[in-house]
Amino acid sequence: MEPLIITVAAVGAELTPEQTPHLPITPEQLGETAALCMAAGAAMIHVHCRDDDGRNTSDAARFAAALAAIRERSDLIVQFTTGGAIGMTVAQRTAPLQLRPEMATLTCGTVNFGDEVFENSFPIMREILAEIVRYGVRPELEIFDAGHVSNAKRLARDGLLTFPQHVDFVLGVPGALEASVRNLVFLVDALPAGCTWSVAGIGRDQLPVATVAIAMGGHVRVGLEDNIYYSRGRLARNDELVARIARIAGEFGRPLATPQAARTMLRLV
Ligand code: KMH
Ligand code: ZN
């Protein structure tokens, strides 16, 4: 079986330090998390940044410090968010791209996000994609809902995107597509030929869909951004969520992709 790429989504934009003491807030903490997660088997880190008070920020200087800290402590593929947080402008969401990370997310459509709306209209997607292309960054297509695959195909038909691409299915967001095996199979079947894909289940859905993805030959995203618990009532560290996936992959006889192997598999080199 193809080696498994584990991505760690270490902090996200929504969680507060009051919810868990394990959030990497500072660039140094992100660097330390990167080192621990790489040792546990991760190949990629999905990056949001916080200010010193733990609030979400799109400050390019903060992202630059995070990038430097992650690179100093690990060889992980660095993937910046362009989703940011609900309500951010496109300029804020894309500001860190000037640092030219290897990858950046592109959410492929508007979606309910709890009681809020995560807005990604076609004009917004086109603007973000233009910035991704401008800085020579490779996108990861974030699919929260079934129609998002159709939207990505429309971007391709309009000549703004070429397939195959790497895709991440984020399943189980309240207001978006549920994290079921049936939904995952449907989404994978809907992808254009040659795409690579991972799945990020939200909350208690993280482990079951990750296990299914390992069996299906897909890839896995875990981390506190999507799920803060290791088990019921027990808060997790990012590296132990990665280590658990690595152990399960071992039971399936699935080797882990090193960051360098993942770069080849994702056509980054
Ligand atoms: N914070 C969410 C509203 C991404 O990073 O690309 C969006 C998000 C997606 O986290
Ligand atoms: Zn994110």
Image (cartoon, helix red, strand yellow):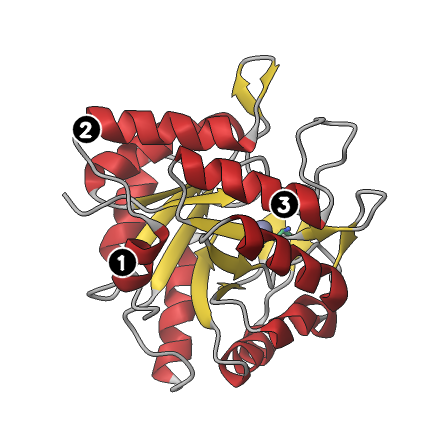
Tell me which amino acid carries mark 2.
Answer: Phe
Per the model, the C-alpha gap separating discs 2 and 1 is 25 Å
Q: Which residue is mark 1?
A: 190
Q: Residue furthest front?
A: 72
Residue 186 percent location from the top left of the image = 27, 48
Per the model, the C-alpha gap separating discs 2 and 3 is 30 Å
Do the numbered discs 2 and 1 sit on residues whose CB atoms are within 8 Å?
Answer: no
Mark 2 vs 1, N-terminal side: 1
Mark 3 vs 1, N-terminal side: 3
Mark 2 vs 3, N-terminal side: 3
Judge the density around disc 2: few (<14), some (14-19), many (≥20) Cα neighbours within 10 Å.
Answer: few
Q: Which tag is nearer the camera, tag 2 or tag 3?
A: 3
Residue at 68% from the left image edge and 67% from the top image edge:
93
Q: Which tag is nearer the camera, tag 2 or tag 1?
A: 2
Residue at 65% from the left image edge and 71% from the top image edge:
94
Tell me which amino acid carries mark 3.
Answer: Leu
Between 261 and 141, which is closer to the camera in this rendering? 261
Q: Which tag is nearer the camera, tag 3 or tag 1?
A: 3
Judge the density around disc 1: few (<14), some (14-19), many (≥20) Cα neighbours within 10 Å.
Answer: few
Q: Which residue is mark 3?
A: 30
